[in-house]
Image (spheres, grey):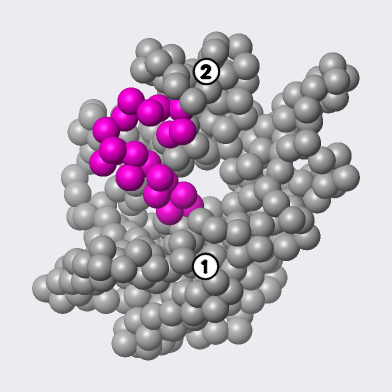
Amino acid sequence: MKVRPQLHGLTVARGLAAWMVVLFHIRSGMPWLPQSFVVVAAKGYLAVDFFFLLSGFVIYLSAHGIFERHGLAALPDFLRRRVARIYPLYAAMLALTVGFAALLTLTGRNADGYPWRELPLHIVLLQNWSFTDELSWNHPAWSISTELAAYLLFPLIMVAMPIRRLSSPKLVIGIVVLLATMAAWLRTAGLTELGQQIHRFGLVRCLFEFSAGCLLCALWLRTGKNWLRFAAPSAVIVAAAALWASDSTHELWAFPAMAASLIFLIADLSAWQRPPAPPVRALIYLGELSYATYLSHCMLFIWFKIVMVNDATDIPPMLIALYCMATLAASVLLHHFVEKPGRRWVSGRRASLPAHA
């Protein structure tokens, strides 16, 4: 049985992307930032699109073999492992948010951002399947809701589409068609940026980009090591960036194309590198914490501002640094004492098929 490569570079990228989302959510409290930095921070929502593509890539890498061998018989174990991966930490953060909302309600404070009538949707991870009019409760969790839909789609992709048998040109065409169709859908709906109207189109972004990520991984596994393997994605990144710079509305397709190419290149570099040096291991650990960072940072920022901040529009750099350290500490604690134990507990039953993720 072929050993799956440890693509540490993708883990590092995941950690950095999680902190881009953190920066996106706290940027309004830092008017002292250089304008160029503010421009970058304002695009932090694009890290979620990177996550969707990366999720499709990694899940195809880890699970395509078992579906090819066992078909839909692999579905129960696959879904159990996926739920074990995302739900325990998600449930813990939702419970903390519910406690906070209850405290606001009991003390007569504004709790409009935590509509109790929508809570059942959040409990079953359906809140961003176009059932609501805006984001509520723990906002970043919207993408976890759409990821659940992607996990349900993946077995259908594996059973209905002969991805492994497709040639490299057909896989490239498939990726282009998926990303172009998504961009056309969003543009037709009046969007000019990927982060707009998340409650309506977040699910669209996730399913198209996740599917493209699956094809991207199949392409990465199939292509031979030659100069075109490096030149083609590099050229896509340069061309897409240039067109995006010329017209900001090109973001709808340009960023996903750039992100897919970058994932391909990082995967290659990861597969060929030697065992990581200590500084890289620290960044790998940051990536391992990324899910806890992503799910906890937004509510933590709300609580931090209530306790520590007088003016939420102008937070001193020292307090921002303190918040970042608190977020990192919370990520460590949640990862080791909630996420990992929860994953082991949900996955505790003996699998009927070999492990795949």
Q: Position of residue 224 (x, y in %)?
A: 22, 75
Q: Which residue is mark 2?
A: 311
Q: Disc 2 residue type? A: Asp
Tell whether 62 sits left or right of 276.
right
Which picture quadrant has residue 133? bottom right
- Does residue 348 appear in this view? no
- Which class describes the residues within 10 Å of circle 2: few (<14), some (14-19), or many (20+)? few
Q: Is residue 302 above or below residue 262?
A: above
3D distance between C-alphas at marks 1 and 2: 33 Å
> CB under 8 Å between callouts 1 and 2?
no
Q: Disc 1 residue type? A: Leu
Question: Is residue 81 shown in magenta?
Answer: no
Seen from the viewer's position, the closer of residues 236 and 77 is 236
Q: Which residues are magenta?
A: 27-48
Q: Mark number for residue 106?
A: none
Seen from the viewer's position, the closer of residues 62 and 211 is 211
Seen from the viewer's position, the closer of residues 62 and 29 is 29
Q: Earlier in the sequence, mark 1 or mark 2?
A: 1
SS class of the residue under badge 1?
loop
SS class of the residue under badge 2?
loop
- Total numbered labels: 2
Q: Mark number for residue 191?
A: 1
- Which class describes the residues within 10 Å of circle 1: few (<14), some (14-19), or many (20+)? some
Q: Position of residue 199 (x, y in %)?
A: 66, 57
Seen from the viewer's position, the closer of residues 148 and 200 is 200
- Residue positioned 50% across, 75% down in the render: 187
Tell whether 55 sits left or right of 88.
left
**Dot in front, 1 or 2:** 2
Tell whether 143 sits left or right of 271.
right
- Does residue 209 appear in this view? yes
- Residue positioned 44% across, 22% down in the render: 314
Which picture quadrant has residue 70? bottom right
